Structure formats: structure tokens, C-alpha cells
Image (cartoon, rainbow, N blue to C red):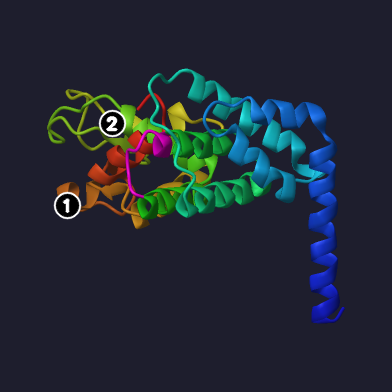
Amino acid sequence: MMAGEKDTTLKQALVKAGERYRDHTTLRAAVQAIPYVGGPIDTLLSGHAGKRQEQRFSSFLDDLDTRLRRIEGLPKLEETDEFFDLILDVFERVIRSKSRAKRERFAQIIVNQLQGSRDWDTAGEILRLVDELSDIHLEVLREALSAQPCGAPFDGLRVISLAVDDPAGDSIIKPTKLRDVLPGYSDIALRMACSELVARGLLHDEGIGRWDLGALQYLVPTELAHWFASQIFEDA
């Protein structure tokens, strides 16, 4: 297919997708009823949503609606270019995401932005990072942030562990073993997830400097992890 034909086909698909959305009266009514952002969202969706994505959009919009209705005193929405750019970016990622949990994170990003908690560039970076992280990453991060503070030699740090044996003995509050709290994932999957979180600065490898152990044995959440969680988890 030539480039011009490909562009024409894409435009035709977008037009047909928009027509399907505009004809979906029930979905449009639900979108328009969302406080503060229903009108702008409806305008965007009427040109960007197709029937195949309606289920994902519906669950996302239901969640966004619920979150917004729990908040009182939201400032008046300014329909700026930055706002529309963020919304479009979120919608594109919602369409691609099979994970309901990730779509919930996207909704929380919009809610936080409407509350005026950060600048638009920061919101975009948070959105990008959430999109790059899978459910296992976020589950590991939650366990790290909620781990029980350990005793010596970790001195109150919240530590998660991939280690098989604990060289510190039985007299301390031990690190949280990921294989125990997340049994649905293999050891390899957990190790890969931890490695990627370390690379992004969300976890710190604590074991190497304390016992000269191998990498990815004992890990602690960083300050960035605490801040990031406060931006994407409603209960953080």
C-alpha cells in the first residue's frame, strides 16, 4: 500500500470510528454527565473513539466519574491546549491498555491535574511512566512502600527481599519476601520487575553495600517512589 493510500485509509477509519461514537447515545450521555470534564471529553471522543474500544473507555470513564464525584470544591476547568493535549494522550493510552488497574492510574492522573497539584510537563512524564510500568511493577512498588519497617541492620527501612536465605538471622524484623506476598508471579518475573524499578530510580538496591551480596537481594523504595505513588494511587 502506498503512503497516500495508507493515510487515506487511516482517515477513513477515524471518521467511521467517530461516527460510531456519535451514534452511541447511551455512552455519549454517560460521558457528558461527568462533572467538569464531560463536555470536553465528549468533544474529543466523538472524533477519536471506535466501537472496538468502547468497553475500555466505558470502564475508564466510569472510574473517572466516580473519582471526580468524591471531590468537592474543584477549581473551574480551564480548557487550555495543555489540558486537551493531556486528555488526548491519556485516551490513546487507554485504548491500548488491557489492564483495568492501569486505566485506573490514568484516571487518577487526570483527577490530580484537575486539582492543580502539578505542572503539565510533570503530568505528562507521570503519564508516560505509568504507561511503561506493568501491573507487576506497581504491585511490587506497593509492597515496597507498605513493607513493615525492619530492625537492625536495616534500621527502620522498609525492605523487600528476593533473597532465598536471610543472613541477618531470626532476631530482627525481617524484610518482606516478594515470593510470599506476590505468589502469582515467578521468581524470574519478580526479579525482572525489580531490576526495571531500580533502573527507573523507584527502588534502591540496599543489600550490596551491607553484606556485599549479589544484586537484587534487598531493595528499599526511594523518595521518588513515595512521590510517584502519591501521584497515581488514590490511597497513597
Amino acid under disc 2 = Pro
- Magenta residues, start to end: 112-119
Query: Is 117 or 170 nearer to us in this picture?
Result: 117
* Residue that appears at 47% across and 38% down: 110
Q: Residue 184: which quarter of the image?
A: top right
Q: Earlier in the sequence, mark 2 or mark 1?
A: 2
Where 99 sits versus 15, above or below? above
Instruction: Please tell me whether mark 2 sits on a helix, a strand or a loop.
Output: loop
Question: Disc 1 residue type?
Answer: Gly
Residue to which mark 2 is pinned: 175
The x, y position of residue 207, in whole percent, is: 23, 47
Residue under the point 54% across and 33% down:
104
Q: Of residues 92 and 142, which is closer to you in this image? A: 92
State whether residue 200 is above or below residue 20: below
Q: Which mark is residue 209?
A: 1
Residue 75 visible: yes
**Left or right of 108 on screen, residue 62:** right
Residue 162 painted magenta: no
Q: Residue furthest bottom?
A: 2
Residue 192 appears in the rendering: no
| Image disc number at residue 144 | none
User: Is 111 on the left or on the right of 151, as rendered?
Assistant: right
- Which residue is pictured at 80% across the width and 64% down the height? 10
Residue 127 at x, y percent in the picture = 47, 48
